[in-house]
Image (cartoon, rainbow, N blue to C red):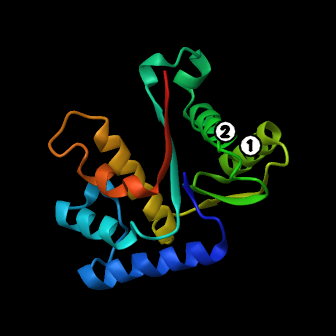
Amino acid sequence: MVIFDHRDAADGTLQAIEGVRAKTGHKTEFKFSQSRRELRDAFFAGVVHCPFKVRALIVDKEKVHSNDLRANASSFYSYFAKTLMAYDGEVLANADVRIDGSGNREFRRSLNGYLRQQLGQKVRDVRMSDSKRDPLMQLADMCIGAITRSQRERDEANRWLDQLKPRIADIKHFG
């Protein structure tokens, strides 16, 4: 979850991402898994001083015991989105929430209803956003990629997480 305290912070970060795009000549969506090392470095260097925070929940799927969550991707996604938002450090009070993904109309409606039921009036608005068109969703993807990479035993596992550390508010583990 990438969090902005106010709309101006999101707008400034959006401008920084567009600055990285202009500087690198990158024309498509920023996706961690599809980016070269140099592009990742340029991206994080361009946004690390922006006013946002990252909160993450790492889920070890092997430790999920619910048959419904294991068998139903929609239930899994909804449950862990709710779990992440429930332990938000109170930053989501009356927030507008954008979730990466398109999903079909029924899934979007179901997720929105589920989150409202589970979180009450904590958030003001929940909407899905297509990362291909939304650079702030691309920021979330890049942050998730850096965190995920740090959990695996791979070359430079912590390289991008170390660059992102000034923006990390919390990383929790489930399981």
Vertical relation: 125 (above or below) 57: below
Image location (x, y in percent) of residue 104: 62, 52
Callout 1: few (<14), some (14-19), or many (20+) C-alpha neighbours within 10 Å? Answer: many
User: What amino acid type is highlighted by mark number 2?
Assistant: Lys
Residue 158 image-quadrant placement:
top left
- Identify the residue under disc 2: 82
Q: Which mark is residue 167?
A: none
Q: Position of residue 175 (x, y in %)?
A: 49, 21
In depth, the one of 118 and 109 nearer the eye is 118
- Between 62 and 91, the one lying in front of the other is 91
Residue at numbered disc 1: 115
Marks 1,2: beta carbons within 8 A:
yes
The type of residue carrying mark 1 is Leu
Label 1 vs 2, first from the N-terminus: 2
Q: What residue appears at the point 37 percent right and 45 percent down from the top-left corner?
A: 147
Closer-to-camera residue (134/166): 166
Q: Position of residue 143 (x, y in %)?
A: 40, 54
Relative to 33, 118 lies left or right: right
Q: Is residue 5 above or below residue 75?
A: below
Determine the residue located farthest toward the right in the rendered image: 121
Numbered label tally: 2
Secondary-structure class at tag 2: helix
Location of residue 30 in the rendering, given as x and y in whole percent from the top left corner? 35, 66
What residue is at 71 percent from the left and 47 percent from the top? 90
Residue appearing at x 66%, y 70% in the figure: 6
Q: CA distance from mark 1 to mark 2?
A: 6 Å
User: Residue visible at 62% across and 78% down?
Assistant: 8
